[in-house]
Amino acid sequence: DASPYLADIVIADPEAWECVRAGRERPMRRDDLAAALDAEVDAAGDVHEIMRVLRRFKRRQTLRIAAGDIVAGQSLQTVVGQISHVADSVVAAALRGAERVVTGRSGTPRGPDGRQATIAVFALGKLGGAELNYSSDIDLVFVHSDDGRVVGARPSTNQEFFERVVRETVRLLAEPTELGAAYRVDLRLRSHGTVGPASLSLAA
């Protein structure tokens, strides 16, 4: 009754309402949110299924958080913290999904010592401060561990590999679908802004 957007979620996804009706609007730990979402993403068969899982998860969690906000009267700090925890979980799951997709197409990035190179994502802005609101975009910066080469079906530099991972991550988060987008993503706070690489090595 307080929000057409929330009403649309309930109408489109009655199971989301059942979670709220059962009194589950209480705050959740970030680790618990991440574990639940990771299990769903790992079970997803393809990119489109991953996008659906991410968006459904975010919509259901938004309804839960809004119930705590509007009905249970939770504090502003609790509400923005919960919104930020959900975004953390969704971004991390999207990055894992993107790595899986790109590795399946290209191979495994290796550093000079032969070990697998890895990538991390940092949140800046409101998400970095755990102060995200219901409609905020998210400011992200990506960093990979090592320069080197990809070993596999599509040899390339690690830089090229992780550029593809970043593009796939942004696609999983921001591409419009029948469930909308999960988040609007802004990468402009990285070094050199829009003209710089999407991911930098630690050395760089």
Image: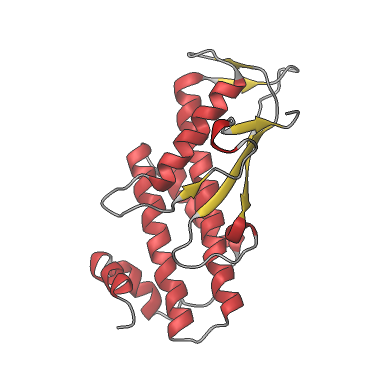
Pick the front one: 32 or 197:
197
Q: Residue sitting at 28 percent across and 71 percent down? A: 10
Specify how the rendered protein is coloured: secondary structure
Residue 148: x and y in percent read 67, 18
- Position of 129 with respect to 65 (left or right) is right
Quadrant in the picture for residue 194? top right
Relative height, residue 37 to residue 7 (above, below): above
Residue pictured at 57% horizontal, 82% vertical: 75
Q: Is residue 17 left or right of residue 95?
A: left
Judge by depth and name the residue closer to the eye, 20 or 148.
Answer: 148
Q: Position of residue 185 (x, y in %)?
A: 48, 48
Residue 102 position in % (x across, y down): 48, 28
Q: Quadrant of residue 22?
A: bottom left
Residue 46 location (% of width, % of height): 36, 36
User: Is residue 137 placed above or below 106 in the rendered structure?
Assistant: below
Residue at the image position 52 percent from the left and 57 percent from the top: 87
Location of residue 131 with respect to 57 vertically, above or below: below
Q: Would you say residue 161 is visible in this rendering?
A: yes
Which residue is drawn at the image coordinates 44% and 53% (left, top)? 183
Quadrant where the image shows the N terminus:
bottom left
- Number of numbered discs: 0
| Left or right position of 84 against 52 | right
